[in-house]
Image (cartoon, grey):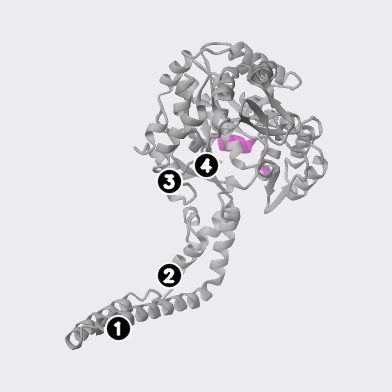
Amino acid sequence: MEQPVSQIPYCKTGYFNQLVTDFLAGHPNLRPFYKYSSVAPDFEAAIQAKKAFPQQRDVLVAALQEQYKDLEITDKVRHNIESLLDQQTFTITTAHQPNIFTGYLYFAYKILQTIKLADQLRSQYPKYNFVPVYYMGSEDADLDELGHVYIDGKTINWPTAQQGAVGRMQPEGFEDLIAAVKNALGYGPYADELIALLEKAYLGHKNIQEATLYLVNELFGRYGLVILVPDSPKLKKLYVPVMRDELFHQRSFDIVNETIAKLSKHHKVQANPREINLFYLTETSRERIVKVGDIWKVLHLPVEFTEAQLEKELEEHPERFSPNVILRGMLQETILPNIAFIGGGGEIAYWLELQQLFEHYKVPYPVLLLRNSFLLTDANSQQRLQKLGLSITDLFEDPEELITRFVQEHTNAALVLKDEYAAIEKLFDDLVLKARSIDVTLEASVGSERTRAVKSIGKLEHKFLRAEKKKFTWQSEQIRTLKSRLFPANSLQERKENFMPWYVAMGPAFFDLILKNMDPLSDQFGIIYQD
């Protein structure tokens, strides 16, 4: 059955900041900080810019083939990897850390949007080929962010004492985690299939990045998605010139701060550069590199380098150097023939700081696109809303404000005391005139009494509303229940929930449903009504 969809402007959801809405609108305050329109980009110009940039496609393909050598892959994935050798092939990329069990719903949305855009561009520009890529941020060390999953109101945490890059961590204790996930998901037609997939991913691989590679390939390989793990000596070698410049000259600090000084006049800054925007990576740590005098030290580790030693380490072991948020995007754009990057609001915010840095290193700056956002609703919720006479868009409001509006619209009582306020104002206007005629100093006393009287009316109005709300207890509870169900923890569903509850019920068709409703260049928040 056809799934209906409605839309709401991002600015009317209440869940996106001014930077996102200005970005989509091409606001003059923000427009100088990115190269191409976010809703009508010139892809041909991005392609030509990338063509002029020297690419070592053979290194990229060799790294991908080595990465995939132990995996079963679809013909589409194999073809897409091989096609990257062709100068007429370009990538559409999204990036995300290897959250356990993929983390949030928007993880899938980002990937599916790259797939949809690549498909559309193949039709639009038939002389070129386009490959969707998921760039795995496996060097992220924020386990608090990556090490949990939320299912059916429960947060399941991975209790590990491991440190360093999460992608390199061993999946210890995942038998218990998967059992907890299975219990939280309950029964569904695809439950056994999904649990078996999780077991193969996390119990059958030596670290989190390999487990995530396997899992994401199994879920999205049929669409031809190529997964890139940049934690590779071959790929890092391509970035050595920029990393060397960063270590010895620290160019990015001044360049990005210059951009931030302009950007911060109107918008909050997402990320601030450090003097050196590289970490030193070991199997169990990812620590900042700092320069002290003529020595480069690794914080919290007994590791330090002279200039000659650092040069040798960089040449022989580029994989030990890990860019932070300031330099990560340029690594991605150096190793991939990429023309468009799809990210969330936070990612767009830090990319806006980087255009000048890209220009300095003569790396083409990609088309930036905001990831699609959706709210998935179910038939039961739709029926409840219908009984209340509300629409799904009403639920984007604060629930208590929505309840107040609902009561005011459905009560027979006069809860808003407009006439009474008007009467008080008229009474005190007359009293002011009398006070002036008697003694001008009395006017201040009349003003104080006016304020007190208006406050008293306000208190009565509040009491009337509170009393009337008791008559709408059932409706109020229904509104609160629907809000918490579709907006868990008063957050957008996609920022809290995981894909698995939907997958258990629908299987791979869930991703087909999302893909069908994707509009890669949309400036609207989508609502999908499910049966």
The residue indicated by pointer 3 is 18
Q: Residues within 10 Å of mark 3 (few under 14, many from 20)?
A: few
Query: Of the residues tagged 4 and 2, which is closer to the observer?
Result: 4
Badge 4 marks a residue whose secondary structure is loop
**Dividing the picture into quarters, in which one does residue 299 lie?**
top right
Q: Earlier in the sequence, mark 4 or mark 3?
A: 3
The amino acid pointed to by label 1 is Ser
The residue indicated by pointer 2 is 408
The amino acid pointed to by label 2 is Gln
Q: Residue furthest front?
A: 293
Query: Of the residues tagged 1 and 2, which is closer to the observer?
Result: 1
Disc 4 from disc 3: Cα separation: 16 Å
User: What residue lies at 48% left-to-right and 43% top-to-bottom?
Assistant: 525
Badge 3 marks a residue whose secondary structure is helix
Residue 67 counted in the magenta span: no
The residue indicated by pointer 1 is 445
The residue indicated by pointer 4 is 373
The amino acid pointed to by label 3 is Gln
Q: Is residue 25 left or right of residue 390?
A: left
> How many dots with numbers?
4
Labels 4 & 2 near each other (Cβ < 8 A): no
Q: Earlier in the sequence, mark 1 or mark 4?
A: 4
Disc 3 from disc 2: Cα separation: 31 Å
